[in-house]
C-alpha cells in the first residue's frame, strides 16, 4: 500500500476525512463524551467546502475521464 500515492488522490483524501470524523464521534459516544459541536454541523460544513472545491474544478480534475488523476500523479 503506497500511502503517498493515496494521499495524492483527492477522492481518497475526502473519503478519509469524512470517515475519520465519523470514527472520532463514535469514539466520543463510546466514552460518553458529548462535544459542543454536533457531527451533523461538521459534516454540513465539510460538504459545503467539498462542493465549492468541486465547482472550482480543484477536487475533480476536469481534464481526465471519471475521477482519475493525470498519469503524472498516478506514477
Image (cartoon, rainbow, N blue to C red):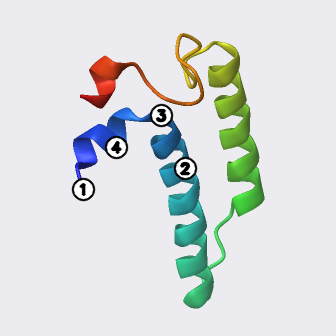
> Label 4 vs label 2: CA separation?
11 Å
Give the residue at x 33% y 21%. Answer: 71
> Label 1 vs label 4: CA separation?
8 Å
Residue under label 4: 6
For label 3, the crowd category at 10 Å Cα-Cα, with few meaning under 14, some 14 to 19 and many 20 or more, is some
Position of the N terminus, as image quadrant, is: bottom left
The x, y position of residue 69, in whole percent, is 44, 25
Query: Looking at this view, is 58 or 21 the one in front?
Result: 58
In this view, the mark in front (4 or 2): 4
Residue under label 1: 1
Residue under label 2: 15
Q: Is residue 11 above or below residue 71?
A: below
> Label 3 vs label 2: CA separation?
9 Å
Residue under label 3: 10
> In the figure, is residue 57 to the left or right of 69?
right
In this view, the mark in front (1 or 3): 1
Q: Tag on residue 25?
A: none
Amino acid at each position: 500500500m503506497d500511502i503517498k500515492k493515496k494521499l495524492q488522490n483527492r477522492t481518497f483524501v475526502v473519503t478519509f476525512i469524512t470517515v475519520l470524523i465519523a470514527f472520532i464521534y463514535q469514539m466520543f459516544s463510546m466514552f460518553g463524551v458529548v462535544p459542543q459541536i454536533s457531527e451533523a454541523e461538521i459534516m454540513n460544513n465539510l460538504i459545503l467546502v467539498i462542493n465549492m472545491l468541486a465547482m472550482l474544478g480543484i477536487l475533480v480534475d476536469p481534464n481526465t475521464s471519471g475521477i482519475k488523476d493525470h498519469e503524472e500523479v498516478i506514477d
